[in-house]
Amino acid sequence: MQPNWARVPLPGTRRRRRPRKRRGAGLSAGSRGDGAMGDAPSPEEKLHLITRNLQVTILFADLHAYLDNMKAPWELLELRTSYYENVIKAMLESIGVPLEKLRFVKGTDYQLSKEYTLDVYRLSSVVTQHDAKKAGAEVVKQVEHPLLSGLLYPGLQALDEEYLKVDAQFGGVDQRKIFTFAEKYLPALGYSKRVHLMNPMVPGLTGSKMSSSEEESKIDLLDRKEDVKKKLKKAFCEPGNVENNGVLSFIKHVLFPLKSEFVILRDEKWGGNKTYTAYLDLEKDFADEVVHPGDLKNSVEVALNKLLDPIREKFNTPALKKLASAAYPDPSKQKPIAKGPAKNSEPEEVIPSRLDIRVGKVISVDKHPDADSLYVEKVDVGEAEPRTVVSGLVQFVPEEDLRDRLVVVLCNLKPQKMRGVESQGMLLCASLEGVNRKVEPLDPPAGSAPGERVFVKGYEKGQPDEELKPKKKVFEKLQADFKTSEECIAQWKEANFMTKLGCISCKSLKGGNIS
């Protein structure tokens, strides 16, 4: 019987599992050298796989990293390979994984051999451009004019199954098209199909896919405590919203499996600490707004730092500090390469005219089927069909006060599911925080019609973005300066929100926030 294997993504790695002949199984893993952690299995999954009599091989896929739109410069690949070997060992040791069942392989140790290169040519003679591009769609960086190297990437990953002599490959669900590609094309070269196993993707802290190129979407293994605090503070964690919530997902896939429980740390006046032994109970309490996002983030920060402390300590030596800085040099200290003027090099202006804010009329209001704190409204914003808007106003505004009411709606946010219902806009409201929190929807001037544009005085001109990109945080940056005046007028930096008929206001909240 040939040894078998599985692909397991680690930070910047690709992984494979391989049982030894008649002696149980082995696991191999690999690294692309780009620092991406989005498709990594949870520590519990790694521990479970490794301790079940598996030999684990971690493949540092240095050649893949270079081919994927040159994510890792060639001159840094060897340094990054050494960096990842050290950081992965430190990570696994911190959660009790036995390292004697690990071996590390570098892709270029065998991918530049005569036999492997010949198989690349053989594979390229039977693979269509369509299939190669489709296979890498969720893994290889997609650009307008892709390089040929990106089309080679899925073929190399498929051939790795044969050259590592494995039975199964284990990776994130974003790998499924490459897995299908391998199952189709390896038999064409006379090689056997492998089993493919997948784990869910943990969303990034920003609410979208975790990305190595988006610093705020991820926690790095060597982040300082102040970095962890800063990133979690900015993390998307809307009250009651469990969809695309990276903070909750981290608890579900990392912290809960490791400890079998999670403790919410909070002041006695808010109920004191609470220990959850089932993740679904925590998710339900968060959805019902029993658990506040601030308490959730603070508790994750404490638990996460406990996991990271042993890794930080391991890297607090001169040799490993030097390795880390050499593998990932500070961009600010790099000598700039002389180039011609870049297109669109000027930073984008973050101004109110980029927001598509309109007058809306609430046609219907229903309770959310799965969340007691949420309404599902149908709102006419001057389009052919009303929009569905989900808002957390149940505790603050009676249904009858919303129905048939004129409101103010932000219309160019990216649609997002809230407890399974897609929300296509945001009802803008004024609020006063505190023990007795107060919330009031903003009111357009009397006589306004659905679809009329709402603007900030002085920013009447300019076209709003078609859709606000979550990564750029345009709304969040502007919203920090949204307030109500002493006359209850909605303002941005003391400039009034208006329509052609007059100012936007709220009923009674002076000096409140607007969101």
Image (spheres, rainbow, N blue to C red):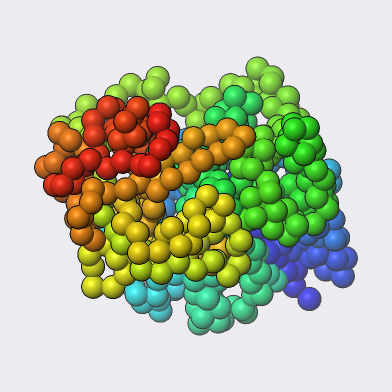
Q: Is residue 423 above or below residue 487?
A: below
Q: Is residue 195 above or below residue 511?
A: below
Residue 507 appears at what percent x and percent y?
A: 38, 42
Residue 340 appears at what percent x and percent y?
A: 15, 32
Name the quadrant containing residue 455: top left
Residue 156 appears at what percent x and percent y?
A: 49, 63
Q: Is residue 186 above or below residue 365?
A: below
The residue nearer to you, when weighing 105 against 415, is 415
Q: Is residue 485 left or right of residue 383?
A: right
- Residue shown at the point (41%, 69%) measured from the top left: 364
Q: Quadrant of the C terminus?
A: top left
Name the quadrant containing residue 486: top left
Q: Is residue 57 left or right of residue 152?
A: right
Query: In this rendering, does residue 424 appear at all?
Result: yes
Q: Quadrant of the N terminus?
A: bottom right
The residue nearer to you, when weighing 245 against 75, is 245
- Residue shown at the point (51%, 45%) measured from the top left: 236
- Residue shown at the point (74%, 47%) measured from the top left: 255
Q: Is residue 362 left or right of residue 24?
A: left
Residue 437 appears at what percent x and percent y?
A: 55, 39
